[in-house]
Image (spheres, helix red, strand yellow):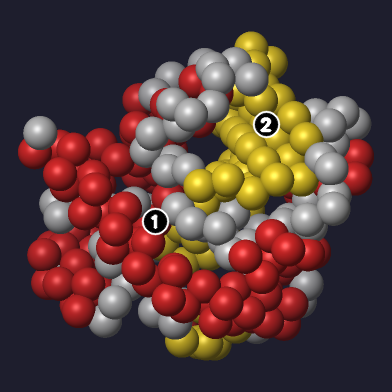
Amino acid sequence: MHVKKERVEIIMNNFYFFKDKNDEYRNNILNIQAGREGLFNTIFDLINTNLNEGDTVLDIGNGGIIRCNYKKLHRLICADLFINENVANKYLYIENVSFETANILDLNKFEDNSFDTVIACGVLHHIAGKSKNKTKENVITALLECNRKIKPNGKILIVEDMVYKWFEMFEIIFYPIIQTICKTLGFGYIYQYSLQSFSRLLEYCKLKTDIIPIRPGEYGWFMNLKIPIVLMPSRPFFFIVRKK
């Protein structure tokens, strides 16, 4: 019961932030990625290179941003805690694109082994919990849920900013304070892993992974602020995770 209650709190924290500020957040991300020497196009190309003609794809935590060539897919399901109606209406008459509500911590609404690929772009740092251990549990749950939904030869494509190890140590030491600040500012709980720590979680889940560093642009996005990349404590990475 306690686990379920905390999970609901995590979901609702993110729900209210993204529901109230989704268009602003979406536009900010698109603008900063467009300006980061084509970061959006880089991510778009990396994702599409790993999608095949006729694939069935789940884009979880979509945020109203389609980052793949849906025309070559059999079906693309864009899933998030709520549906951005402005975006969904643009694809209303596209037969192979649909928008559904879903939570990466519980994907039971979808059949097991039903997707060729699951995409999770900029999602995992948003499922932090009140404690570092709870955050670890949530990320492991999310990885295993995605793994459960892909076909035997399927893939999970993850895009996340990974912080430097020194910054992660700062996050760990001041975890309660940072989460209180984040929640007060309306962001919900947030935690970004270092590449070393995240790689260990993937190994713990027995998931074989290829890791590709993504070249950052001139600016980054941190706590809803546009910041010169030289001042950012993180860098973007692309993960190709194979079926367990």
Residue appearing at x 87%, y 28% in the figure: 54
Q: Secondary structure at mark 1?
A: helix
**Position of residue 142 measured from the top left corner of the image (x, y, whole percent):** 40, 36
Q: Which residue is mark 1?
A: 125
SS of the residue at dot 2?
Answer: strand
Picture quarter containing residue 115?
top right
Q: Is residue 199 left or right of residue 180?
A: right
Residue found at x 19% / y 67%:
179
Give the label, 1 or 2, closer to the camera: 2
- Amino acid bearing label 2: Thr
Q: Nearer the viewer, residue 232 or 52?
A: 52
Q: Could you say which disc has been placed on residue 169 in the image?
A: none
- Using the image as rendered, state which of residue 217 and residue 129 is in the foreground: 129
**Location of mark 2 (residue):** 117
Q: Marks 2 and 1: in contact by CB < 8 Å?
A: no
Q: Earlier in the sequence, mark 1 or mark 2?
A: 2
Residue placed most toward the observer, 189 or 10: 10
Q: Position of residue 32 (x, y in %)?
A: 64, 80
Q: Position of residue 24 (x, y in %)?
A: 54, 82
Side (left or right) of 186 relative to 2: right
Q: Is residue 100 above or below residue 52?
A: below
Rendered residue at 67%/31% (across/down):
117
> Crowdedness of circle 2 by 10 Å Cα count: few (<14), some, many (20+)?
many
